[in-house]
Every structure is written in structure tokens, then in C-alpha cells.
Image: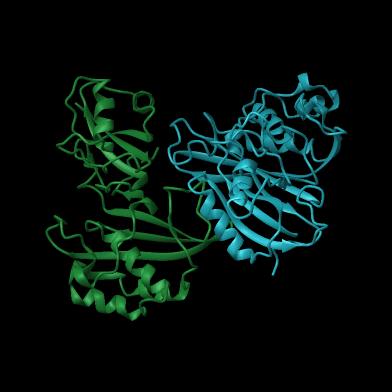
Chain colours: A green, B cyan
């Protein structure tokens, strides 16, 4: 048996999320497992660093797969991409790894990007790829609100009711809010980094910060909401199409060299 | 009668191009004219700075329209965007202008961007929005080849057979070739600027430069091809989905203030 790490990019729209569902809904995991079955008899079961929700995108998801044959990593990625067509899923890197490598349990950091576009006119090229809001948010308010969330906290407020994590205590290492030119408006990007995230944590945070940026919430209400440790204190959950899993860090980069 | 300048963004895929066709194929011009007819009885005939081809995108096309009523510019753009839904066409700015303003004949500069992504794995989020090639081009060769084209030249080689311009002599003010990070590969952007362009000129130039970047043509062959003044000396024409009309300059910015 040989273990391979796969870096995976996908468009979230046609999928019920990363994870294979018992009812056979299209998932990214099932798409890749079915491509693997075209190479070697299955069933295949792969594991990923982040179990992204329906509609959420990835540019740097990482998964691992076990194969009986000894594959050249480049040829494996080419063959998988061939069999994944025409689905919007692409293997952008592939590497042979030790049997101890686990895409989920070996990961020491996940990075997410959330793209919000503020303008009146509907987006065209980026339809389905950003969350569109009508008015330019107050950047300083966004940053003040976000700063309350950095560090080690009980994130019960920002966690889906269905979240299966053992503990709601997580350390959020970074939320960087940046502004970028966008035709006829402006784009706000939220970059988040943590060892791991709770279910819906990023979308709950961005949806809450959006209220702050719009002036509907004072920035300090983010601190109050966090301290409440109560899901009811959270703002609206931002929609999935603005969210991207951009990268995963391991003690040693499986794709280096 | 009141004249309005419209800044227009569109996704080129569903359209036969900017220009209204006699056979009724969907065009961006017809889409906007039909939206205008929902506001005031038509027929409306609008003019644009660049008559983009089938599949070509715009982020900064400019058109002008004449209306009988005196519209508030913001309300006009909102009403047009409402009636344009769900087509991927958006009015991102709108301004009342003098009757002498003509979107096409008053323009003193057009700007185009061409996006090329070099990587093996198929693109997912950017499908239909970039030209994908397999290998990273030689950036220095691209720049050396491009430099031959800047300035005032007879661009017969880089002009579609169907081009209706009176003269093939144009002044190309800029071709800037830049490289940008892209997951699993790299993105090359070509920024071109000129008072006006011939039909298919940008795509003919980029398609020819791609041959240079791939090492199939020495950079000097671009100079030879230009000097030949012969369409047969041109490289392949790049596909439309990488091309964006990004902006148009007028003696006075109609959207300022």
C-alpha cells in the first residue's frame, strides 16, 4: 500500500460539501473516490483536512488516499484529473507520503479566505464566487470587531448547533481584513487562520462582522456575543459562496520538493 | 432628450458579442436596449466604445443611451440592472453627459486585459474566465516578443480578415506582461493600451506571443511577422474567454464626480 497526499481545488456550487453522504448526493469526496476507482478497484475512502459545507470552495484542500499500486505522483494527479472531468474538481498537487501522514489528524493549521464584494450592481464574472452586499462596510469597525475574536476562546456563539467537535474552545490565530479594488465597488477579504475550526465558525464570524461593518452592531457587541457562549448571540451566518479553504499546514510540507 | 453614459460589465459566454445581430442572436447591446425599452418605449439604439467579440468579457465597457425623460443617473442604473436580471450584464456606473459625448467616437484610449493561466490541472473557479495553457511560458521571451509590437505600426498581420477599419496602422501604447500567483500554477496577464484596436488585434497578439513564450517561436519572429503585413504570418488567435475590455478613456471622465 502507498499513501498519497492530494492538494484539491473545487467549485462548491454543484456539491453538498466535501463529505460523502449516505443518500448519494454529489460530494467532492465521492467524486474523487470514484475517480480513484477508475484507477484501482474500490471502494476507496479518502480523508480531508477540512470538511467544507455545501457551496463552499477550496483552492488548497488536502486529502490523502491509499492505493495498492506504486504510482508516480505526477501521473496519478493527471489520471485523476482526467477522470474528474467535467466536474469542477482538480488535483493541483500530488505527493507520495509516509503511512503516518493523515490529511486531517496531521494538520497543524487551516487557512480560510472569505470574499465579500460591496457594490449595487449585481456581480457577473464572480457570481457564485463572492458574497455580495450593497454598501461599503466600515473597514475600521470590521477590524475592531474582528480583533475581539483573535486568541483562545470558547466559540460556542460562533458554532453550528450540529457541530460535532468535542470542545468549543479554539485558538484563532489570525483574522486579517483587507480591502481590494473592484469595478464599480470594493472587495473586502477576510483571511482566517487557526489550528482547527468549529463547524460554521468562519461563516458565523463573517456574518456577524458584516453587521458590524454595516453599522447595525457596535464593534464591542462582538465581544459581548463571544462572552455569551450562546448560539443565539451570533449574527446571521454568511452564505457559503464567499468562503474558500485556501491551505493546510503540516509539520512537514508533503508537497515540497 | 438626455444622453447618459453607462459603464458596463459583462460575462461574454452567453453572448454573440457586444453588437446586435440581424438574426436575433443574444448580444450585450440587445440586452441593454431591451432593458431600456422597459423604461421608455423603444426602439433604442446604443453605441459602445468597443465592439467585443463572442465570448469576450468586459469590466469597463462604456456605452451611451438617449432617453426622452430626465432620469436621475443612479436610479437609471438601478432600473437597468433590475431589468437586466438574470443576464450577466451589469451597469456599474451611470452619468448624464453632454449631447456631444459619443461612447465610441469620443474615446481616446481603450484598455484590455488578457488572462492566461499555466497549469496542468483544469481550472475550476476560473473556467470560462481565462485561457488555460499547460506549461509556464518564458516570461522574458514574452516581454521581448511583445516589445516589438509597441508603437505605431501597420498591424495587418494581427488583424482579422473581416476587420472593417479604414487603416491597419495603429499605435499600440503599451503591452505589459506580468506574472501572478495561481494555485498549482501561475497566471500571466497581458495589459494592452491603445487609442483604438483592430478587429481581433489583442487575441492575435496574445496568441502569437503564446508561441514565443512556449519556445515554439523565437521572440524576433514577432518582428518578422509584423513586418510581413500578412495575416498568414500571424500565430494562432487566442480564445476569447481570456479577454476583458477593462476601461475606456475620454477627454473628460464622464463618471467623475
Of residue B12 and residue B137, the one placed in the foreground of this image is B12
Task: Count how many numbered circles sit on residues in the image.
Answer: 0
Residue B238 placement, left or right of A193:
right
B229 lies above or below A55: above
Relative image position of residue B103 (x, y in whole percent): 75, 51
Q: Residue at x 29, y 61 (%)?
A: A237
Residue A179 placement, left or right of A147:
right
Relative image position of residue B107 (x, y in whole percent): 79, 51
Q: Quadrant of residue A100?
A: top left
B181 lies above or below B239: below
B74 lies above or below B212: below
Residue A153 placement, left or right of B49:
left
Relative image position of residue B171 (x, y in whole percent): 84, 42
A76 lies above or below B5: above
Q: Quadrant of residue B100?
A: bottom right
The quadrant of the image that shows the C terminus of chain B is: bottom right
Q: Residue at x 32, y 46 (%)?
A: A55
Q: Residue at x 74, y 34 (%)?
A: B201
Relative image position of residue B80 (x, y in whole percent): 57, 54
Residue B1 placement, left or right of A133:
right
Spot the residue most to the front: B41
Q: Residue at x 76, y 29 (%)?
A: B158
The quadrant of the image that shows the N terminus of chain B is: bottom right
Q: Quadrant of residue B224?
A: top right
Amino acid at each position: 500500500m502507498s499513501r498519497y497526499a492530494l492538494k484539491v481545488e473545487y467549485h462548491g456550487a454543484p456539491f453538498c460539501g466535501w463529505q460523502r453522504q449516505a443518500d448519494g448526493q454529489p460530494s467532492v469526496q465521492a467524486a474523487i473516490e470514484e475517480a480513484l476507482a477508475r484507477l484501482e478497484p474500490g471502494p476507496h475512502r479518502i480523508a480531508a483536512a477540512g470538511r467544507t459545507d455545501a457551496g463552499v470552495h477550496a483552492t488548497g484542500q488536502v486529502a490523502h488516499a491509499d492505493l495498492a499500486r506504486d504510482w508516480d505522483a505526477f501521473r496519478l494527479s493527471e489520471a485523476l484529473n482526467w477522470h474528474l472531468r467535467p466536474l469542477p474538481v482538480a488535483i493541483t498537487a500530488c505527493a507520495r507520503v509516509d503511512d503516518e501522514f493523515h490529511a486531517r489528524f496531521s494538520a497543524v493549521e487551516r487557512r480560510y479566505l472569505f470574499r465579500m464584494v460591496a457594490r449595487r450592481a449585481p456581480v457577473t464574472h464572480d457570481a457564485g464566487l463572492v458574497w455580495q452586499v450593497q454598501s461599503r462596510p466600515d473597514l475600521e469597525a470590521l477590524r475592531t470587531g474582528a480583533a475581539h475574536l483573535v486568541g483562545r476562546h470558547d466559540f460556542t456563539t460562533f458554532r453550528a448547533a450540529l457541530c460535532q467537535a468535542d470542545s468549543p474552545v479554539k485558538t484563532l490565530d489570525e483574522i486579517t481584513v483587507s480591502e481590494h479594488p473592484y469595478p464599480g465597488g470594493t472587495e473586502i477579504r477576510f483571511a482566517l487562520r487557526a489550528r482547527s475550526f468549529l463547524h460554521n465558525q468562519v461563516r458565523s464570524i463573517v456574518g456577524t462582522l458584516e453587521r458590524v461593518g454595516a453599522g447595525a452592531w457596535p464593534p464591542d457587541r462582538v465581544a459581548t456575543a463571544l462572552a455569551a457562549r450562546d448560539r443565539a448571540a451570533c449574527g446571521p451566518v454568511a452564505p457559503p459562496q464567499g468562503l474558500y479553504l485556501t491551505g493546510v499546514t503540516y509539520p512537514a510540507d508533503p508537497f515540497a520538493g
